[in-house]
Amino acid sequence: MFQLNGQVALVTGASQGIGEAIARALAQAGAAVVLTARNAEKLAAVAGEIEAAGGAALALPMDVSDPAQVKTAFGEALARFGRLDVLVNNAGITRDGLAVRMKLEDWDAVLRTDLTGVHVCIQQAIPPMLRQRRGRIINISSVVAQMGNPGQVNYVAAKAGVIGLTRALALELASRNITVNAVAPGFITTDMTAALSEKTIEQLSSRIPLGRLGSPADVSAAVVFLASEEAGYMTGQVLSVNGGMYMA
């Protein structure tokens, strides 16, 4: 079940956190994985560990906010593997602040990376998927796109835009056997949350019906499912991985 043998997957933001967990899980399911991120050193380390475990991996430094870098990286991935079956748009940044004081450059930076970057990567993925008449595009959104979050109007707008993009693109590509879905994680334990105090973690956990923060593995399991044949009849969907925090 959920085997991806012979497939090629590209994951953005794969050098750490959720993206790293997704890349590892896809490799464990049998896919050759192209890992992209801005941090070349961390990226190479993750790719090396995947290969040491018997998987196939290619590390390509790439900033999704730079269309030229995206085009180059996708070209290198296709030159290496000859196909692209799965695209996971995970890369993202935050520039938090109250709306009344938010600098336009902070708004633009988040939208350029978290939303426009998704679009640019998808444009590079569509041609090979069309040729194959098969593909899986999986976009990582967030629970805050569904419920809002004060101090993050730029991030929430970008992640809500990802959901809208997912549904529109699902309609465009369904006839070509390319599915487009989103995963909306809740609060997930990563290096970012590791810096939070125990009291803050307790407060966050109290808002979650399951009583705990999620793990990167919780998110990567959802991604592997959506990449698999078993999810072939799902498109335009948002798979919520949030411990029950938002149930609409």
Image (tube, grey):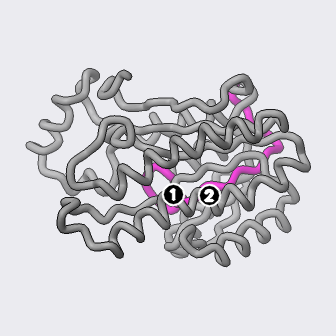
For residue 245, which quarter of the picture? top left
Task: Look at label 2 and name its amino acid.
Answer: His
Span colored in magenta: 1-19
Give the distance between the C-alpha atoms of the residues marked 1 and 2, in whole angstroms: 7 Å
Please name the residue that numbered disc 2 is placed on: 119
For this orientation, the residue located farthest to the left is 199
Give the secondary structure at mark 2. Answer: helix
User: Relative to residue 237, is residue 246 drawn left or right?
Assistant: left
* Residue 2 falls inside the magenta stretch: yes
200 sits to left or right of 66:
left
Q: At 50% across and 59% down in the image, what residue appears?
A: 91
Q: Which residue matches tag 1?
A: 115
> Which part of the image, by quadrant, shows the N terminus?
top right
Query: Which label number is shown at residue 24?
Result: none
Question: Residue at image x 36%, y 49%?
Answer: 156
Q: Nearer the viewer, residue 41 or 227?
A: 227
Give above or below for 42 relative to 238.
below
Residue 227 lies, in percent from the top left, at 68, 36
| The one of 100 and 119 positioned closer to us in this rendering | 100
Q: Nearer the viewer, residue 191 or 62?
A: 62
**Residue 23's spot in the image, x, y percent?**
59, 50
Residue 20, compared with residue 211, is above or below; it is below
Marks 1 & 2, CB-CB < 8 Å contact: yes
Total residue callouts: 2
Quadrant where the C terminus sits is: top left
